[in-house]
Amino acid sequence: MVRKMPPLEKVYEAFSAIGDERIHVEDNAYMVFSSDKSKYYTVTEKDNVYRSDDNATYWQGYPGYPVIAVLILQGKLPYNREVCEEMKGIPWKVLNDKYQRDYAAAAEEALQGLGTDTQKIREEAQKVYDALQVLDIETGRGKRKKG
């Protein structure tokens, strides 16, 4: 089971990464690009240990949105294509900076900005979060890129 859980809002960021098709597989590693595409994070997996160099996984010790997105794409967490499509194009970097890492406030603005009923999105995020809580994985620090 996951030792330390991320904020629920990281699931929304994972939905966006999938909807935006910002995840690429290369040499048994997943490259997950940030919402502004200015950087990417590398996620690797071996024996149910997921390593990533994103700040949340690396510094906070919980699965960050790149790890969550990979778990969804691997079929280890629920996947709803329609919800991921609805979450396309959200500028998470801008929102997280605006709200000084208050992820709940950033997510609320993102959801309100969609202009649709967000109940289904919220329900899907909770399903993913609940499944993550009981998933038999570990997370760890990935190698940091130089330069």
Image (spheres, rainbow, N blue to C red):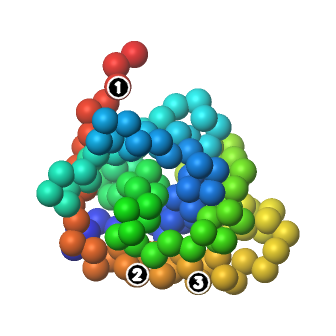
Amino acid type at mark 3: Glu
> Residue at the location (44% across, 61% down)?
73
Residue 123: assigned label: 3
Residue sitting at x 68%, y 63%: 85
Residue that badge 2 annotates: 130
Quadrant into which the C terminus falls: top left
Structural distance between the alpha carbons of marks 2 and 1: 32 Å
Residue at x-position 62% and y-position 43%: 35
- Classify 143 as above or below 19: above
Secondary element at tag 3: helix
Q: What is the three-letter code of the residue carrying label 2?
A: Asp
Residue at image mark 1: 145
Within 10 angstroms of label 2, few (less than 14), some, or many (20 or more) residues?
some
Which comes sooner in the sequence, label 2 or label 1?
2
Q: Earlier in the sequence, mark 3 or mark 2?
A: 3
Q: Nearer the viewer, residue 127 or 57?
A: 127
Task: Label 2, secondary structure: give it.
Answer: helix
Mark 2 and mark 1 in contact? Answer it, CB < 8 Å. Answer: no
Q: Image check: 63 left or right of 94?
A: left
Q: Reading the chain from its start, which is encountered first: label 1 or label 3?
A: 3
Vertical side of 23 occupied by 10: above or below = below
Give left or right: position of 71 versus 90.
left
Q: Position of residue 70 (x, y in %)?
A: 40, 56
**Do we see residue 95 in this rendering?**
no
Determine which of the numbered discs, if any, sits on residue 8 in the image: none
Across and down, in percent, residue 32 comes to: 47, 43
Marks 1 and 3, Cα distance to the nearest angstrom?
A: 36 Å
Q: Which three-letter amino acid code belongs to the residue tagged 1?
A: Lys
Q: Is residue 138 left or right of residue 87?
A: left
Residue 39: give x, y in percent of width and height.
Answer: 52, 31
Residue pictured at 62% horizontal, 65% vertical: 84
